[in-house]
Amino acid sequence: MFEGIIEKIKEYGVIIIHRHKNPDGDALGAQIGLCEMLKTAYPEKKIYAVGDGAGRYAFMEGSEMDEVEDSLYENALAIVLDTSAAALISDGRYTNAAATARIDHHIFVEKICDIEVTDTSYESCCGLITELAIEGGFELTPLAAKSLYCGMVTDSGRFRYDSTSKDTHRLASHLMKTEFSTADIFKNLYSDDLDFIKLRAKFVLKIQDAGSGVAYIYTTLDDARSYGRDNFTLSRGMVNVMGDIKGIDTWVNFTETEDGVLSELRSSKYNVNGVATRHGGGGHAKASGATLKDRAEAMEVVEELKALSM
């Protein structure tokens, strides 16, 4: 599957690894894991990881990004990870690279790079990078294995989502052949300070039952500002407070920002990707997102999600 990318990796002395903006554990885990793999395999090459800040995933070792001069792209291979659309890539300079490659597990939206490996059967991009390690015979350091495992955990919902397969467990098992602390991962992922727990309680109280098995939360710009948290935390970080409600099959979290209304769509039963793509977004069948114009469009999304069950 990765023959073309492996050949390009061998060819170039400078490799710059990109991923999507506002990274989650999968994007960072894939980026850190691949960076570590290549540095170990090719100590003579210059390997960089670039992008915006790690946010709540700053606890991940290796999540500090490199500063890369524009001139380095002239003779570099740029690898884009965990990204379905060009507009979502953090640091658009990848287009200046001599060659480009993409590895992704989202539903295909558009061609981004010269060489592309996209496979939606994988629960995470970290799963794909682990497959690359096996296929290419790359050594996994404890940091690489831990980072990739962290991304598999987050994108599979702790192996609960139905994207989890026998291959997910096969790849996780391969990672665990290298010694690292899973307890350290879970402690950082799922323990929060008291203020965050109180914030989550506020979001629970904001849940609206729209009928037809659909729930939503809508946060205004004024409320968002009053919470004192970044947009990622308020949007993607809070969407799953609705995820375990009996009778709710589909849920969406709307967050007003200066640049539009962030919407995070989730479902345990239906494909919500079509709704997201109609509104300029994308993602997975049961976990997608989009940025909307205003509250009116957000309510249109709610009605479209309700229609899925009819």
Image: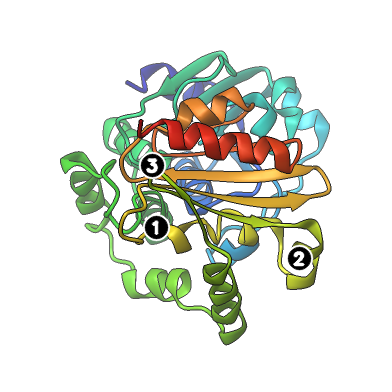
Q: Are marks 1 and 3 in contact (CB under 8 Å)?
A: no
Q: Residue at x 32, y 20 (%)?
A: 1
Q: Earlier in the sequence, mark 2 or mark 3?
A: 3
Q: Which mark is residue 231?
A: none
Q: Residue at x 18, y 45 (%)?
A: 170
Distance of mark 1 from mark 3, alpha carbons? 19 Å
Distance of mark 2 from mark 3, alpha carbons? 33 Å
- The image shows residue 296 at horizontal and vertical percentages of 71, 38
The three-letter amino acid code for the residue at tag 2 is: Asp
- The image shows residue 251 at horizontal and vertical percentages of 46, 49
Secondary structure type for disc 2: helix
Q: Are marks 2 and 3 in contact (CB under 8 Å)?
A: no
- The image shows residue 270 at horizontal and vertical percentages of 35, 35
Residue marked by disc 2:
223
Distance of mark 1 from mark 2, alpha carbons? 22 Å
Secondary structure type for disc 1: loop
- The image shows residue 310 at horizontal and vertical percentages of 35, 30
Q: Is residue 86 above or below residue 122?
A: above
Q: Which residue occupies the foreground of this view, 26 or 39?
A: 26
Quarter holding residue 50: top right
Say which of marks 2 and 3 sits in front.
Answer: 2
The reply to whether residue 54 is visible in this rendering is no
Q: Residues within 10 Å of mark 2 (few under 14, many from 20)?
A: few
Residue marked by disc 3:
124
Residue marked by disc 1:
243
Q: Is residue 214 left or right of residue 69?
A: left
The three-letter amino acid code for the residue at tag 3 is: Ser
Secondary structure type for disc 3: loop
Q: Residue at x 33, y 40 (%)?
A: 123
